[in-house]
Amino acid sequence: MCRLLGLIANKQVKADYWFFDAETPFKDFSEKKINKGPHNSGWGIAWLEKGKWHIFKQGKDNVPRYSFNRIRDIKSKVIIIHLRKASVIDGVVKENTKNAHPFVYKNYVFAHNGGVARKQVLPFLTEKFKKEIKTDTDSEVYFLLIMQFFQESKDIIEAIKKTLNIVRKYNYKGLNFLMSDGENLYAFRAINPRHKDLCSYYSLHYLIKNGEVIVSSDPLTKKSADKWQPINLSELLIVNKNMSIKKLGV
């Protein structure tokens, strides 16, 4: 159970306004008891710099208190930030830096809000991709399964669909994710129908403003001029580097 924030623009932008200074700053979800928070089991940021992904993470194992100042220094055309609230369907909960999101595989980064049945999904990974696992999380297995199918088909949408067909067969809660290949931002929202009581928690919204698209688990401003739009259940939002937006049911 986590919070997601993503930005994409056709120019380099910063996330510090949305993280620190918005009416409901994203930082508050880490530190305060709002919307099932605090989400303080670890945090991370991924950003693109000179065509290469950079990742910065912190967990409860290496710092007594999180410092988010690194965010103020980052400018990029794509930024993904994740606040973790450790919660898994099976396995051991570890609030360490290793298990913080986002995860990276080649030119893709991924952050997840929800839970999938790690033990049941893991056997669908080939030995090659099992060797890529670096964390104890169900989320990384979810991500690597997408990457495995993408390597096979070279079609990221088909890879997402195949992965969802598998994870939906087993116990899961939310399947929300943000993912990027450096040119596109993918935002997906889904929830197990048996957990309808958590529908408002597993939310995703997006805002188009000042030449950028912001995607957040929760709207970060209340201004009437800021028209936050919900991403529907089982809907994949795709924003490309030219700020063109596409929506697909998956």
Image (spheres, helix red, strand yellow):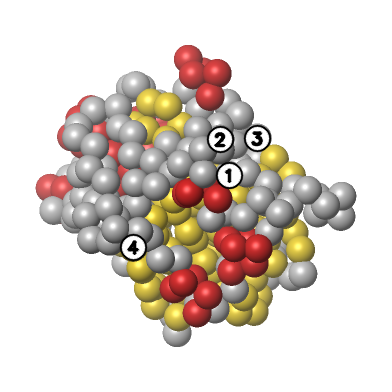
What is the count of numbered marks?
4
Q: Residue at x 54, y 78 (%)?
A: 75
The reply to whether callout 1 and callout 2 are in contact (CB within 8 Å) is yes
Marks 3, 4: nearer the viewer: 4
Residue lying at the far right of the rendered structure:
224
Residue 206: where, in percent of width, then height? Answer: 68, 50
Q: Amino acid at mark 3?
A: Asn
Q: Is residue 148 above or below residue 193?
A: below
| Secondary structure type for disc 4 | strand
- Left/right placement of residue 212 relative to residue 233 reads right
Return the disc, 3 or 2, that comes first in the chain's sequence: 2
Label 2 belongs to which residue?
35
Q: Which residue is mark 1?
A: 217
Q: Residues within 10 Å of mark 4 (few under 14, many from 20)?
A: many
Vertical placement of residue 126 versus 19, above or below: above
> Viewer-proximal residue, 223 or 118?
223
Q: Is residue 159 visible from the viewing direction of this image?
A: no
Q: Is residue 85 at least partly visible in the picture? A: yes
Counting residues from the start of the chain, the first of labels 4 and 1 encountered is: 4
- Whether pointer 3 and pointer 4 mark residues with C-beta atoms closer than 8 Å, the reply is no
Considering only order in the chain, which callout, 2 or 4, is on the residue closer to the N terminus? 2
Q: Earlier in the sequence, mark 1 or mark 2?
A: 2
As helix, strand or loop, the secondary structure at mark 3 comes to loop
Q: Are marks 4 and 2 in contact (CB under 8 Å)?
A: no
- For the residue carrying disc 3, how many other residues have a C-alpha within 10 Å: few (<14), some (14-19), or many (20+)? some
Farthest bottom residue?
A: 50
Q: Nearer the viewer, mark 1 or mark 2?
A: 2
Q: What residue is disc 4 on? A: 57
Among numbered discs 3 and 4, the one appearing first in the sequence:
4
Circle 3 residue: 232
Task: Tell me the SS state at disc 1.
Answer: loop
